[in-house]
Amino acid sequence: MRNFGEMLYQAKKRGPVTVSVAAAEDDDVLIAVAHAIKSGIAGAILVGDRDKINPLLEQLKFPITPEIMHEPDPVRAAQTAVDVVRAGDAQILMKGLVNSGDFMRAVLHHSRGLRSEYRLSHLAAFEVPRESRIAFMTDAGINIAPDLQGKKEILMNAIMAIRNMGFQVPNVAVISANEKVSDKMQSTVDAQNLVHMNRNGAFPPAIVEGPIAFDVAVSQEAAHHKGIESSISGKTDLFLMPNIETANVAYKMLTYWARAKTACLVLGATHPIVMTSRSDSAEAKLYSIAMAAATFAGADSASIKEPARIGKAV
């Protein structure tokens, strides 16, 4: 998968999914949803304040007349949007104009949420200028300082997700500051343990190397200069970061400095969750919907409701 255009194609090939949008009265979210509908990857059920949503739909010349579930309170809108997914009327949950904490409380509700046996984690995708492929990074948004077990669960989520997107044997770099294992740097010890776990079959098929510094992971020239033999150098599909600070800084540097196009998901729930930032562009939100649709393992024409189910063409 070389770019987000190919991800959009992959999502379209899987068949359209239905997105349940919590507090949908957000122009960038609705722009993204409109493009997802036009691209043939999704339909939508909009949960929120109808009196605010309808003028935005008219202004945006929305491509269909969507189903709107009127709930002006953002907290209740989040729970209703989750209920829609739980009922099977949508396959993807998306955050709109609602506080992230309130949104996640609905996701994690003990009886009405989308809990699964997996840990929740954040997966970001990047299309970096002058690079020839999409690369993924975890976890820049949810787990602050995961221990070895936490990293194992985060890595499991990410490998499963990108394999669903078509990466049969992804190249995984477990990032640290250098390639030498030292008891003084816990991330190197964790990386070594994760590599051993992979060799013992703890994860779906993947090539896992670590500890490995970021320069070696992205550059064969850097690996050569450092005298490091690596089978994934310059070909890394997934970067497992040591903590949220490292991942968050890398995410924002790639986005704002390197001008990378981005998408992100929350993994580990029963369904993919699009939880983008208010500062993310409509384009990033569209790519996040495409990423969720491409990730959704059960997407097929027999199980997914067509966009026509949710609204008629304008």
Image (spheres, grey):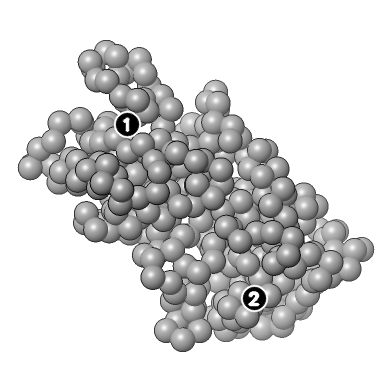
- Which residue occupies the foreground of this view, 313 or 13? 13
Residue 67 appears in which quarter of the rendering?
bottom right
User: Which mark is nearer the camera, 2 or 1?
Assistant: 2
Q: Is residue 224 left or right of residue 314?
A: left
Three-letter code for the amino acid on which mark 1 is drawn: Phe
Q: Is 293 placed above or below 125 here?
A: below
Q: Position of residue 173 (x, y in %)?
A: 33, 37
The residue lying at 27 percent from left, 42 percent from top is 199
Q: Position of residue 165 (x, y in %)?
A: 56, 46
Q: Is residue 92 left or right of residue 265?
A: right
The Cα atoms of the two marked residues, 2 and 1, are separated by 41 Å
The image quadrant where one finds the C terminus is: bottom right
Q: Position of residue 194 (x, y in %)?
A: 25, 46
The residue lying at 72 percent from left, 55 percent from top is 15
Q: Which label is found at residue 88?
A: 2
The residue lying at 34 percent from left, 44 percent from top is 240
**Could you tell me which secondary element the residue under label 2 belongs to?**
loop
- Which residue occupies the foreground of this view, 286 or 115? 115
Residue annotated with mark 1: 214
Q: Residues within 10 Å of mark 2 (few under 14, many from 20)?
A: few
The residue lying at 31 percent from left, 18 percent from top is 222
Extreme-right residue of the structure: 314
- Residue 245 visible? The answer is no
Three-letter code for the amino acid on which mark 2 is drawn: Gly
Q: Residues within 10 Å of mark 1 (few under 14, many from 20)?
A: some
Q: Which label is found at residue 235?
A: none
